[in-house]
Image (tube, rainbow, N blue to C red):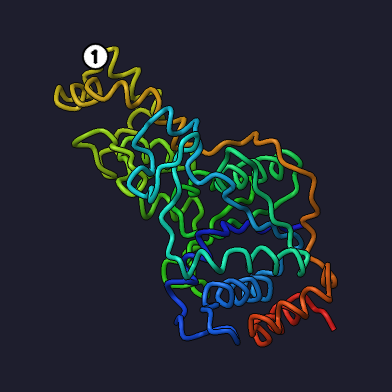
Amino acid sequence: MSLMLLDSASLYFRAFFGVPDSLRAPDGMPVNAVRGLLDTIAWLVTTHGPDRMVACWDDDWRPAFRVEAIPSYKAHRVAQEVPGTTGIEEVPETLLAQVPVIVDLLAALGIARVGVPGYEADDVIGTLTTRAVEQDAGPVDIVTGDRDLFQLVDDAAGVRVLYPARGIRDPDVVNEERLAEKYGVASGQAYADMATLRGDPSDGLPGVPGIGEKTAAKLLAQYGTLAGILAARDAGDKGLTSTLRHRLLESDAYLQVAPIVVQVARDVPLPAFDPTIPTAPADPDALEALTAQWGLKSSVERVRTAFGWA
């Protein structure tokens, strides 16, 4: 029983920027993100044939627990500060208007959409992956344009990432062999440790100054884990140069909290839902109305064909 997990925002952002905004509804509103996501779902189901699919959702794109650990986390993406929140994400208006349409379509089609207040889609994906592995309910394909989720790769458990670097129809299939080839790390956990050391400016994570991917991978090959590297630092291990040891010491405050931010949650309290690929629309009347209102006939037909609906 294969499970496919969609990093929904990653995919509809990719569709928005990759599909011409000349695709419009009868009222003139762009529907390029909607059309692109529907076509992506149809392609994935046709090509990979999952038994179950979940559209994982960012109910909180900048969770408080991560901001408390590292205040700079995604701070540069905040368009507007709102009291009592961690801010509103900067999203193009023409994309923002399409998100409710996507929500309504997923509901009408019967595709499970799961988000949890206080958590990102990454955390939902981490939790669903962990549950599938524990219950021997894989294999699991994670579809995302976010490298952070490479940390979940696990060959023994059948967990891989489909990373659409060249487009959704020709994704990088990221498994442990690919991690070793591309990043010089042996596992998903090692990738997370490497990402912690390297940092990520796109997420506001400073990393350890002077330690990039190659140095981080070399240290992990030498000491196994981030904890092993820090133990070697504290023990004055001669395998660490004085410069590296100094850099690791200078970044100790960051290194103590960064794993909270970098590593996905694996124990999110998820609501009840049915991930099974639907055998018929959950709400045929709503689907028909949405198809007509937003001019989505060809894309919806592709989904219907992919799902095997008459």
* Residue 66 vertical placement versus 124 (above, below): above
| Observer-nearest of 77 and 52 | 77
Left/right placement of residue 238 relative to residue 103 reads left
Query: Disc 1 marks which amino acid?
Result: Gly
The furthest residue to the left? 243
Residue at image point 31% right, 21% down: 253
Task: Report helix, strand or loop for mark 1.
Answer: loop
- Residue 255 location, x and y as percent? 35, 26
Question: Considering the image in quadrants, where does the C terminus appear?
Answer: bottom right
Residue at image point 51% right, 38% down: 63
* Residue 306 vertical placement versus 174 (above, below): below
The furthest residue to the front? 83
- Residue 136 location, x and y as percent? 75, 44
- Residue 159 location, x and y as percent? 60, 50
Q: Quadrant of residue 108?
A: bottom right
Left/right placement of residue 64 relative to residue 27 reads left
- Residue 23 location, x and y as percent? 51, 85
Q: Quadrant of residue 98?
A: bottom right
Residue ID for mark 1: 236
Query: Dot 1: few (<14), some (14–19), or many (≥20) neighbours within 10 Å?
Result: few
The furthest residue to the top? 235
